[in-house]
Amino acid sequence: MIILLNQYLLDSELLLETEA
């Protein structure tokens, strides 16, 4: 479960970097 949350945070960072 923690792994899924960590993966979600990593994906969110990538999306934010892509938008910026």
Image (cartoon, helix red, strand yellow):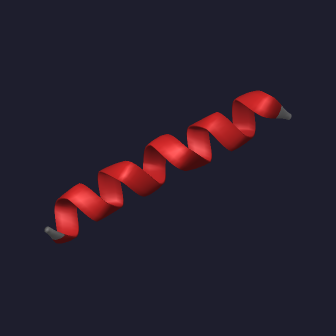
Q: Is residue 4 above or below residue 13?
A: above
Q: Is residue 2 left or right of residue 14?
A: right
Q: Is residue 11 left or right of residue 19?
A: right
**Extreme-bottom residue of the structure:** 19
On-image quarter of the C terminus: bottom left
Q: Is residue 18 above or below residue 8?
A: below
Q: Is residue 8 left or right of residue 11?
A: right
**Extreme-top residue of the structure:** 3
**Extreme-right residue of the structure:** 1
Find residue 6 and report its horizontal and vertical position in percent: 63, 35
Picture quadrant where residue 17 is located = bottom left
Q: Residue at x 59, y 48 (%)?
A: 8
Find residue 1 and report its horizontal and vertical position in percent: 85, 34
Q: How many marks?
A: 0
Q: Is residue 1 left or right of residue 6?
A: right
Q: Residue at x 33, y 61 (%)?
A: 15
Find residue 12 and report its horizontal and vertical position in percent: 45, 56
Q: Is residue 1 above or below residue 16?
A: above
